[in-house]
Image (cartoon, helix red, strand yellow):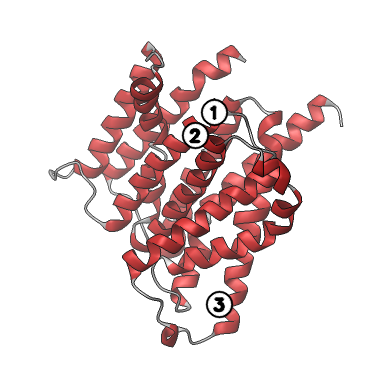
Amino acid sequence: MDMSRAVLLSSLIVLVSGVFWGLYWMPVREIEDLGLRGAWGSVAAGLAGTLVLAPFGWKARRTLLAADRLALASTALGGFAFLLYSVSYVYGQVAVVVILFFLAPVWATLLGRWWMGWPITPMRVLVLICGLAGLAVMLGGEGNLPIPRAIGEWLGLLAGLCWAVASIGIRVRPPLPPVGGGFVFVGGAFLGGLCLAPLLSGPPDVADIAAPVSLMAVVFATGAFWWACLLIGIMWATPRLDPARTSILLMVEVPVAAVSAAVLIGEHLTTPQLIGGILVVAAGVLEVVPARRRS
């Protein structure tokens, strides 16, 4: 495959993945409706994804055992960040959760400065201003304190923070092989969720499950498609694209999630939430502008 076709195919894979991640709230809510309540639905989907990728993880076991420990931990933490993101859909408003997660570039900028000593350029100052202003307007635009008030909002914010930490670790350490790294990522989501779910949701109540066959089908499809197939696709495509293009293409997730939730379940953003969301997305775009110029 020549370079132009590889870039075009990779761009299409990332774009389609972003669209489907924008619809990810639908199977999460469906699992909840089928009786697997709270965080347990996301844990079950993570388990399904782990089982699908387990043969690939086993095949790459020697490489993974010899891999950099911080790279493994960062990748697993990235999986846990997405598990938090998944669980937040159960407890929070879809569009708000997505926007709070996409504050990750703001936290990455602050952590990079404090943790790694990376300089904060004028463009990154603008990223911070847009992102934090968006957060303040979205959460405090109606005269309230600009802090999350629902558990879903806290989980979405924490997911973005965990992803920022994970992304720094992944960036500065030697990369893992794509499929083996995918197994570590999903495994981190499952194990982290297994620890979180009892604290957040208590033990699962199997008495609420009225259609176990339907539930298992949705859980497996969610884990196999979102947590395995889309993840492998992104990991294959990302090295073939510059980081700026990848980030911008994945941002399609925000409008897809907001519009689909508004159309299908009537979740509409208020004016402050909409303005804050626009500022947060603008911060994400500004974050990748310097990388695009360098490339």
Specify the amino acid type for callout 3. Leu
Q: Disc 1 versus disc 3: distance between alpha carbons? A: 37 Å
Q: Do the residues labelled 1 and 3 touch (CB within 8 Å)?
A: no
Query: Which numbered disc, 3 or 2, marks the residue that appears first in the sequence?
Result: 2
Question: Which quarter of the figure is the N terminus placed in?
Answer: top right
Q: What amino acid type should be assigned to the residue bearing mark 2? A: Ser
Residue 167: which disc?
A: 2
Question: Residue 171 — which label?
Answer: 1
Query: Do the residues bearing badges 2 and 1 touch, measured as CB atoms within 8 Å?
Result: yes
Mark found first going from the N terminus, 1 or 3: 1
User: CA gap, disc 2 to disc 1?
Assistant: 6 Å
Element assignment for label 3: helix
Q: Is residue 72 above or below residue 133?
A: below
Disc 3 marks which residue? 215
Q: Which of marks 3 and 2 is in front?
A: 2
Task: Name the image quarter holding the C terminus.
Answer: top right
Q: How crowded is mark 2: few (under 14 residues within 10 Å), some or many (20 or more)?
A: some
Query: Between 68 and 246, which is closer to the camera in this rendering?
Result: 68
Disc tally is 3
Q: Where is residue 292 in the image (x, y as percent from the top left)?
A: 57, 18
Q: Quadrant of residue 219?
A: bottom right
Q: Which amino acid does label 1 sit on?
A: Arg
Q: From the viewer's perspective, tell me whether residue 49 is left or right of residue 196.
A: right
Few, some or many C-alpha atoms within 10 Å of disc 3 (few <14, some 14-19, many ≥20)? many
Please state the horizontal and vertical placement of residue 249, each as a whole percent of the image: 58, 35
**Closer-to-camera residue (24/256):** 24
- Residue 194 percent location from the top left of the image: 45, 63
Q: Is mark 2 on a helix, strand or loop?
A: helix
Residue at coordinates 47% horizontally, 54% vertically from top-left? Answer: 83
